[in-house]
Amino acid sequence: MPTSHDGENPLEKRTEKRSDAKERRTGVLSAKESLSDKKSDQSLRPKMLAEYIGQARTRAMLEMSIAAAKTRGDALDHILFYGPPGLGKTSLSNVIANEMGARIHLSSGPSLERPRDIIGLLNQVETGDVLFIDEIHRLSRIAEELLYPAMEDYVIDLTAGKGHATRTMRLALPKFTLIGATTKAAMLSNALRDRFGFVCRLDFYTVEELALIVARTAGILSVSCEDAAVTMVASRARGTPRIANRLVRLVRDFAQYKGHEVVTEDIAKQALETYQVDVQGLDPTDRRLLTILIDSYGGGPVGIETLAATLGEDSDTVEDVYEPYLIQCGYIQRTPRGRIATPSAYAHVGRTAPGGQLSLNLQPGQNI
């Protein structure tokens, strides 16, 4: 972690470090971007909105706003993208820059900890450019305050000297578009969030949308896939394009290793089973969590701390990394008394649900 600058709360640094640790998920199904993802995704990312698959409402809104801004010869309003990792926030930002015919400057919240960092970044921006800040919720307080006038009035206030000799200078900036991306929208201050003209949530993708992405990726990678194999890969990608692209590469490698030129449904199934990705996109840790909940605690209710201790993880990791998809699939219910395994969870791990099991009849992904 970088050395804290004056005025920064050390507790916030420790919280960020802990946040980094709990966001790391090992294995094939991690939605966090790996080094191999960075190397391969450059060729897979769409260049224009017409190539971008999914997020129909967000895409339609952007099409109208981009067309209007280009007609006026003006910069696009500032945009905030939020949602789980791997859904295309960075890709969509690059698409916006391409559509506007502008350069894009890429940065991240943790790298902008000192005033000179953000001043240097803003000094590179030219008229109409796009400034993309990933993990914008991790901006330091000082950097965030420097952004306020830059976003509102396209100026930056510089302070020189100390004490009675302190002088404030105002530096004009060209009109630009700031695009912020975050997986934790609740951690953004209200003052920063309110300065974005568009606040867009990116949702998980449907199997049909992921099938289009898998087919497109397979084509770019020169992988011949049968339609059934495409659907199988899409159905196990946890609603996340990044995971879908990773699975395509793994299935390709498996097929080449086995000496098959065409990826059939059977080959795709064998490959995914080899990498321990089951029919619902669950990995061994997901299945172990469900098995512990059912076998050790009778399906619940059980508190998150107890469940995490039995699993050998901290409660934040269970709550933020493993639970969301299990809840989305309808395998776990959160209740005031603790976590409860649903009948679907029993069926998935090959157990028989007790007849009197408590069930609140919640829809998948719905919480109390």
Image (cartoon, helix red, strand yellow):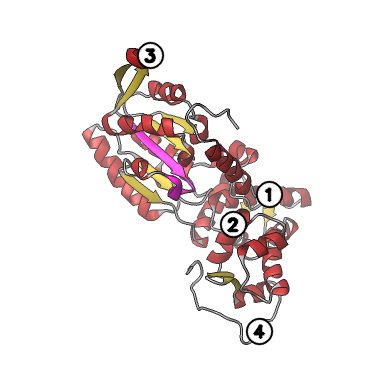
User: Is residue 255 located in the magenta-colored stretch of the structure?
Assistant: no
Of the image marks 4 and 2, the number of the one nearer the N terminus: 2
Between 234 and 347, the one lying in front of the other is: 347
- Residue tagged 3: 161
Q: CA distance from mark 1 to mark 4?
A: 33 Å
Farthest residue, direction front:
164
- Tell whether label 3 touches label 4 (CB within 8 Å): no
Question: Would you identify the image quadrant in which residue 76 lies?
Answer: top left
Provide residue 144's location: percent of width, then percent of height: 40, 34
Question: Would you identify the image quadrant in which residue 340 lies?
Answer: bottom right
- Residue tagged 4: 354
Of the image marks 3 and 1, the number of the one nearer the N terminus: 1
- Residue tagged 1: 26
Secondary structure, mark 2, is loop
Secondary structure, mark 1, is loop
Q: Which residues are magenta?
A: 177-188
Q: CA distance from mark 3 to mark 1?
A: 49 Å
- Mark 2 neighbour density, 10 Å: few (under 14) some (14–19) many (20 or more): many
- Mark 3 or mark 1, which is nearer to you? 3
- Mark 4 or mark 2, which is nearer to you? 4
Secondary structure, mark 3, is loop
Between 262 and 34, the one lying in front of the other is: 34
